[in-house]
Image (cartoon, rainbow, N blue to C red):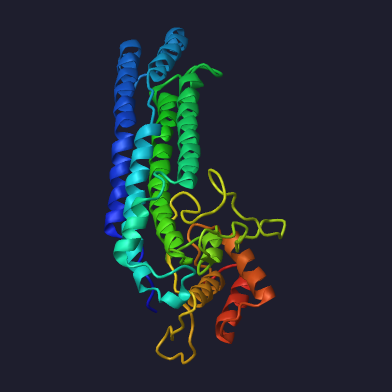
């Protein structure tokens, strides 16, 4: 099946570079804080392998909290700059795809490459929807960092103070390092979203629809979006999902940090992407299939196949089985052998 390519090496490099740059300051500060806490511990206990004397444990916890309190970063401006770089890259990536869409599939007059580039240059910088999204994400990311560091700062004051260095690592240092993990996740999320928003800008300017293309091992939420078409200036349907809660009802993800859902990523570590879409062009998707399928139809069919096979990324086994059972109940529209195998999996409680 021939479909638009996935995330480019350049896009992934932008994500990695942004994550490295924006986490560098926090990482360095945390390394310094960890060394200071370790030195403080050794000074009171004699070595990291010895327990703290009971008489100094509270004093150590207070001093360690003060060390963590000195760790502070503001990622809002550098995050904004990285998103703008990703936005530009998304525009550059999408422009050639728009040129491949026949004029009859456009809602506006056909653009030449030069006209499209000129139109992009005249757009508001940054676009209002991008501005609102990044401001919300940056605020949420900054709040998570601050909350995680505050939690680490006060951990030693809650309950009994740490008695040995293993407890120090678990209660003070590990929570502080979670702020670093969360920041890296948010930076990659933001740059990925910036790229896809750049794609949306190009498609909207040219009057071309966009198509959601799920990653190879997409989750149950993203599989439901695979092959979905969003018209020019329109968001995707955020209520779509194959995920069934334990109450038997569909349970879509909320849109983070704010709606509407303009495109991927749908969740942290999501590798889905979108491309300008020739939504009416049909062609055979497999050598043995004679009927014409649009790319959207092919993606939706393969998404249903993935649900029946239980290959949905990081979803738990019970969640995959519930999704398979629900899809079989409404009809998957797949070969009898595929559906028969899926029913056996539901009865066994396992796919293999």
Q: Position of residue 73 (x, y in %)?
A: 37, 26
Q: Quadrant of residue 185?
A: top left
Please tell me how many numbered marks the rendered image carries. 0
Q: Quadrant of residue 304?
A: bottom right
Q: Position of residue 343 (x, y in %)?
A: 62, 76
- Can the viewer see residue 232? yes
Q: Quadrant of residue 113?
A: bottom left
Q: Relative to the observer, which residue lies in front, 234 or 50?
A: 234
- Say whether residue 228 is left or right of residue 101: right
Q: Position of residue 193 (x, y in %)?
A: 43, 50
Q: Position of residue 117 (x, y in %)?
A: 32, 58
- Say whether residue 266 is left or right of residue 40: right
The N terminus sits in image quarter = bottom left
From this view, report whether residue 139 is shown above or below residue 198.
Answer: above
- Can the viewer see residue 271? no
Q: Relative to the observer, which residue lies in front, 239 or 24?
A: 239
From this view, report whether residue 196 is shown above or below residue 225.
Answer: above
């Amino acid at each position: 099946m021939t479909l638009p390519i996935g995330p480019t090496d350049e896009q992934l490099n932008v994500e990695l570079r942004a994550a490295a740059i924006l986490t560098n300051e926090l990482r360095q500060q945390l390394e310094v804080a960890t060394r200071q806490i370790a030195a403080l511990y050794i000074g009171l206990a004699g070595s990291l392998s010895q327990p703290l004397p009971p008489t100094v444990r509270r004093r150590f916890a207070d001093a360690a909290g003060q060390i963590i309190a000195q760790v502070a970063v503001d990622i809002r401006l550098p995050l904004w700059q990285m998103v703008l770089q990703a936005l530009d890259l998304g525009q550059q990536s999408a422009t050639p795809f728009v040129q491949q869409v026949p004029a009859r599939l456009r809602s506006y007059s056909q653009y030449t490459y030069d006209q499209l580039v000129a139109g992009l240059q005249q757009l508001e910088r940054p676009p209002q929807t991008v501005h609102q999204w990044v401001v919300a994400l940056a605020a949420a990311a900054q709040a998570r960092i601050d909350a995680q560091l505050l939690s680490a700062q006060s951990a030693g004051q809650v309950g009994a103070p740490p008695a040995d260095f293993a407890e120090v690592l678990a209660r003070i240092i590990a929570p502080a390092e979670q702020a670093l993990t969360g920041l890296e996740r948010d930076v990659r999320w933001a740059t990925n979203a910036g790229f896809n928003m750049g794609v949306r800008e190009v498609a909207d300017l040219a009057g071309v629809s966009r198509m959601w293309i799920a990653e190879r091992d997409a989750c149950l939420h993203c599989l439901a979006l695979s092959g979905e078409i969003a018209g020019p200036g329109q968001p995707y349907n955020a209520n779509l999902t194959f995920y069934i809660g334990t109450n038997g009802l569909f349970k879509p993800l909320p849109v983070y940090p704010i709606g509407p859902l303009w495109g991927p990523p749908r969740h942290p570590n999501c590798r889905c992407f979108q491309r300008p879409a020739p939504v009416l062009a049909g062609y055979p998707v497999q050598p043995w299939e004679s009927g014409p399928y649009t790319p959207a139809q092919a993606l939706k069919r393969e998404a249903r196949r993935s649900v029946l096979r239980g290959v949905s990324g990081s979803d738990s086994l019970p969640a995959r089985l519930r999704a398979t059972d629900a899809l079989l109940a409404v009809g998957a529209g797949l070969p009898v052998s595929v559906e028969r195998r899926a029913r056996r999996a539901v009865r066994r409680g396992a796919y293999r």
